[in-house]
Amino acid sequence: MKKIAIITGASGGIGQEFVRELAKESLDEIWVTGRNEKRLLALREEYGEVITPICKDLTQSADLLSFTDLLEEQNPSVLWLVNNAGIARMAPSKDFSFSELEQTIDLNCKAPAALINLCIPYMGRGAKILNISSASAFQPVPYLNLYAATKAFERSYSRALNAELKPCGITVTAVCPGWVDTEMLSKEINGKKVRFPGITTPERVVKKALKDAKKGRDMSICSLYVKCQHLNVKLLPQKLTMKIWLHGIKNYL
């Protein structure tokens, strides 16, 4: 039975860093998914035949459910499942189209939950699931509220599922970074350069996430800045937390 990892949103940023780190593990295959086939094929060129590119749009139920056939056909041992694919946009809620609302919820919430259920039958003791949540999951975040709410779902879902799967020896970890220096970040808004306090690198996030997952932790926080943020939102009223956030972004609205 071949040992595999599955990484969604693998073509850039945090996902690509997970590919780099998991390529060092004793795996027969790493299934990398995303919508950009060219980038997925580039990963295969870089890391060799261990990479299996799977070009899918996980907002589409048919593409999502096609993993059922792949898993049944290959019957692998899934050692790692990394749900990294996600959508984020900072904007007033009224500016979101129905399609954007639907796609964000489908990709950030439905896809990881569905893939987990599809993969659990192929996981044994020692298997690990990492769901890429966010520090924005800690509190309500105006103008980023759709993304933050989906990440709050991922964090809560992950921690509860970790407790459920503990008797099976499967670890579920919610990875909660702050700002990460990837192409997803808009470096400029309305002609103004954006300041990202506590920004960190994908490499740091991923290495800490893998370390925490191997220790069986249900949450991974990679920097002192985010650890302080996590503590602050426990101590401060949420209304005050939102006021502080709004003050910080007022120049970009």
Image (spheres, rainbow, N blue to C red):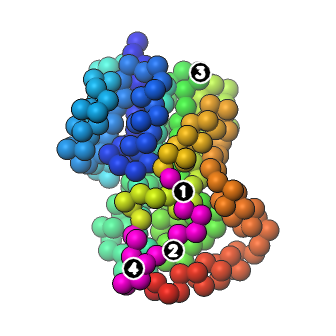
Picture disc at residue 32 = none
- Horizontal side of residue 138 vs 147, given as left or right: right
- Marks 4 & 3, CB-CB < 8 Å contact: no
Tag 4, which secondary structure?
Answer: strand
Q: How many marks?
A: 4
Q: Which residues are magenta?
A: 186-201
**Foreground residue, 51 or 88?**
51
Q: Residues within 10 Å of mark 2 (few under 14, many from 20)?
A: few
Task: Give x and y (percent) for residue 113.
Answer: 47, 45
Whether residue 242 is visible, yes or no, is: yes
Give the foreground label among 4 and 3. Answer: 4
Picture disc at residue 195 = 2
Tag 3, which secondary structure?
Answer: loop
Q: Residues within 10 Å of mark 4 (few under 14, many from 20)?
A: few
As drawn, which residue projects farthest toward the top? 1
Give the foreground label among 1 and 3. Answer: 1
Tag 2, which secondary structure?
Answer: loop
Picture disc at residue 200 = 1
- Badge 4 or badge 2: first in the primary sequence: 4
Say above or below: 23 vs 158: above
Give the foreground label among 2 and 3. Answer: 2
Picture disc at residue 189 = 4
- Marks 2 & 3, CB-CB < 8 Å contact: no
Q: Quadrant of residue 101?
A: bottom left
Work out which quarter of the rendered image holds the N terminus and state it: top left
Q: Residues within 10 Å of mark 3 (few under 14, many from 20)?
A: few
Q: Main secondary structure of the magenta part?
A: loop
Q: Residue at x 43, y 21 (%)?
A: 27
Say above or below: 153 vs 122: below
